[in-house]
Amino acid sequence: MDRDRLAKQLDFALTIDAEKDVIRRTYLTEHRRRENDAEHAWHMSVMAYLLREYANEPIDLARTMIMTLTHDLVEIYAGDTYAYDEAGQATAHERELAAADRLYAMLPPDQAQELRGIWEEFEANETPEAHFAHAMDNVQPMMLNDANGGGDWKERDVARSMPGSRNAVTRLGSTELANYVDEMLDKHVEYGNLRPE
């Protein structure tokens, strides 16, 4: 056994436990509290398994699931950036790149290259797996907002066009799920939870 390799792997495993402390803006279904990044990733991964039949193209399910589980690990250092925070979005990529440099350097080189590569694939959003992972990343919080009566949409006075533009990315991974989300968003405009524009 390579003790140095094991030490690096376990150090990384302990470090990513901090993902449980990264609080997102999305409320859980009962509007009790906001979810954390680890809960979001777990939920997306299970959803990828359950909803894979709606992917526009065949996907490598295991690769898609590890992508959903690890896509937000950089937020341990970069913090979560709210989807509709324009100022935060302007600096998010730069902050996340620096976080990726710091985080993946902890691993043995082969695993650092592999996991960073999966994160970069998600960020580039050019493969069927990345398209479907992004679909899960968008559908999951919208599903929670739907279940909790409009959640942070209503609280933050979000316009229909804002989640609508994210749903265009969902469409790359799943036309069927994007159509479902469009219906959901239209319903929340009717309920007054989203501004119509």
Image (cartoon, rainbow, N blue to C red):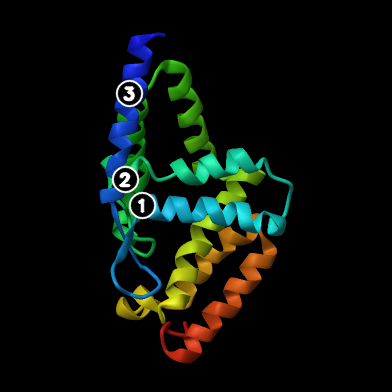
At x 49% / y 43%, what residue is drawn? 123
Q: Earlier in the sequence, mark 3 or mark 2?
A: 2
Q: CA distance from mark 3 to mark 2?
A: 16 Å
Q: Nearer the viewer, residue 180 or 127?
A: 180
The number of numbered badges drawn on the structure is 3
| Residue under numbered circle 3 | 106
Q: Earlier in the sequence, mark 1 or mark 3?
A: 1
| Residue under numbered circle 2 | 19
At x 31% / y 45%, what residue is drawn? 19
Quadrant in the rendering for residue 100: top left
Q: Earlier in the sequence, mark 1 or mark 2?
A: 2
| Up/down of 189 relative to 21, above or below | below
Q: What is the secondary structure assignment of the residue under circle 2?
A: helix
Residue 66 left/right relative to 50: left
The amino acid pointed to by label 1 is Asp
Q: Which mark is residue 126?
A: none
Question: How far across and how far down the image is residue 11, in percent?
Answer: 29, 26
Question: How far across and how far down the image is residue 68, in percent?
Answer: 50, 46
Q: What is the secondary structure assignment of the residue under circle 3?
A: loop
The amino acid pointed to by label 3 is Met
Question: How far across and how far down the image is residue 34, in percent?
Answer: 30, 65
Residue 154 left/right relative to 187: left
Disc 3 packing (10 Å; few <14; some 14–19; many ≥20): some
Q: Quadrant of the N terminus?
A: top left
Q: Is residue 98 visible?
A: no
Residue 21 left/right relative to 138: left
At x 58% / y 72%, what residue is drawn? 181
| Residue under numbered circle 1 | 37
Q: CA distance from mark 1 to mark 2?
A: 6 Å
Q: CA distance from mark 1 to mark 3?
A: 20 Å
Q: Nearer the viewer, residue 187 or 85?
A: 187
